Amino acid sequence: MLFPNLIVVYFMILSTTEISQTLCRHYYPAATVFYGDISPRITSLFHQTGFGFHNNGYLSFELLCPTSHHQPVPQDSPSIILFLCEPNEDKDSAQKTIDMEVSHMEQSCQTYDSSTQPFRKYNSCGGYNVKCVRYLSGSCVKWEREAVISREDEGYYEFYLLQCPNESKYDDDHYIISPTVCQGNLTLMNDGGSSHLGSGEEPLLYAYPLLLMVWTVILFLWGINWLYYKQYSNPLHKLLIVSPCFKYVVLLLSIVQWNSIANTGYEQPLLRTVTLVLSSAEDATLFMTLMLAAEGWCVIRPYIGKVKHALIPVLFLVFLASVICVIWIHSYFMAFAICSIVFVIYRALKWCSFNLDMLNRQILAVQQLVTLKQLHFHGLSIVDQLQRKRDIYIRLRMVIAMYTMVFAIITTMSSFLSEFKYVQVLSFEIPELVVYICIGCIFRLRDFRVYEEIEVVVPREDSVVIFLPYPDMNWPKRQKLILGVPEEEEKTVTPADEKKTLIEEG
């Protein structure tokens, strides 16, 4: 179970750190332009970042080079092609497609030189010729291009720059390659320029409100359950509501965040940070609550040991601090978060197994005692009490194990659907929602009075106690007793037989 746990925790932290990446749709990539080069070049504008166009997609690209860094001798400026490539099935960020295109770059440059429409090569790449709008000393220092993505060209693309050399106007003595770092500005939109979300992100505007409605119903039912049986509420039951409250706030902030990105193209750093911290706190609280429940707190024992009592908040703070450090300092801190959550899952499964073993031994011992003493009960018995607690830990262990395995499978599958953001979000939100529902059903409040009073049926006795008479006051103070037993063979008399006898005698 350790390897799937590691996968789950890694993607869980990766999904939280994803919020820290640039979610705006106004990109400002830096690109190196090679003035005077006679060979075509192709470079990536972003690292593993793409955008899905649909419903009259729109892009605007601008590339501006600093004028102070140009050589005094005019250099040949290259033609700039904005290259759009669909990722390959093996998710190499279109690198294999680019490698194939390199051998055909000169042909592609000739094709794009006069083209004003996207050009597709191997049904995976297309491009736009970016026009020069400003010259300095005979060299282009600014390129611009706006385009509307036609319906047949819609899809998920990653972006590259193809630099095509122009025919040199100077002799070899003046031939100098001058690489210059230029600043790009790429704006990507959909729905005729009204939405900054990609095709795989727009469903999130509906998915998050739907999830919020489901969580509202769940919290409402939990509150109704508490109102009906609040006299049976315990600290574990109260702690179980903390993580869902974090989740509810995170969903509210996610709705605000994605609507802001859709309308403006920019995310709000403060909102992003608050969402990240609360999401990390929600995950940490969920796992710590599972560990407390698995340990038997408020189910088998009323308190936990001092070492465990100190360990749980330490693990919570380590996880929360590690995730924040991943965003603000370095990704190496992810190792601390992974270690803490793997330890929590391991301890939760171990404690569930330990409690199950202890309850099974107690059930066996009680069953032997009941059999030996020939005890009978009205309603529930002592064995039933122990079996109900055992059922709690059987279900809890199953939920933790299935949660781990399902997330391991989803993590593997979602890596092949990077362009469908809403699929990734729902594939993790739905199993987590199911886990919360299962935990709520396991630890919900109910009428526990039936488990508090166990009535033992008193067995009928065929013997009789006889007080012997005493002749006078000088008789010993202790009353003499004798036990009378029937001489005939023992015969079991049921209440129905007694009633029948009384009727006959009457």
Image (tube, rainbow, N blue to C red):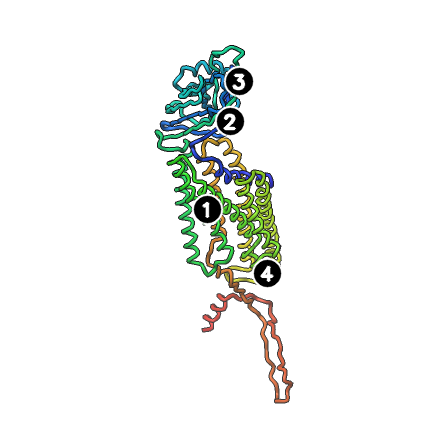
Mark 1 or mark 4, which is nearer the start of the sequence?
Answer: 1
Residue 266 quadrant = top left
Indicate the quadrant containing the C terminus: top left, top right, bottom left or bottom right.
bottom left
The residue under label 3 is which amino acid type?
A: Ile
* Residue 235 at x, y percent in the picture: 51, 57
Residues at marks 1 and 2, CA–CA distance in whole angstroms: 33 Å
Which residue in the protein does label 3 denote?
Answer: 177
Residue at image point 65% right, 85% down: 476
Between tags 4 and 1, which lies in front?
A: 1
Residues at marks 2 and 4, CA–CA distance in whole angstroms: 68 Å
Between tags 3 and 2, which lies in front?
A: 3
Near mark 2 (Cα within 10 A), the count class, few <14, some 14-19 or many ≥20, is many
Between tags 2 and 4, which lies in front?
A: 2
Task: Indicate the secondary structure of the residue bearing disc 3.
Answer: loop
Between tags 1 and 2, which lies in front?
A: 2
* Residue 128 at x, y percent in the picture: 42, 20
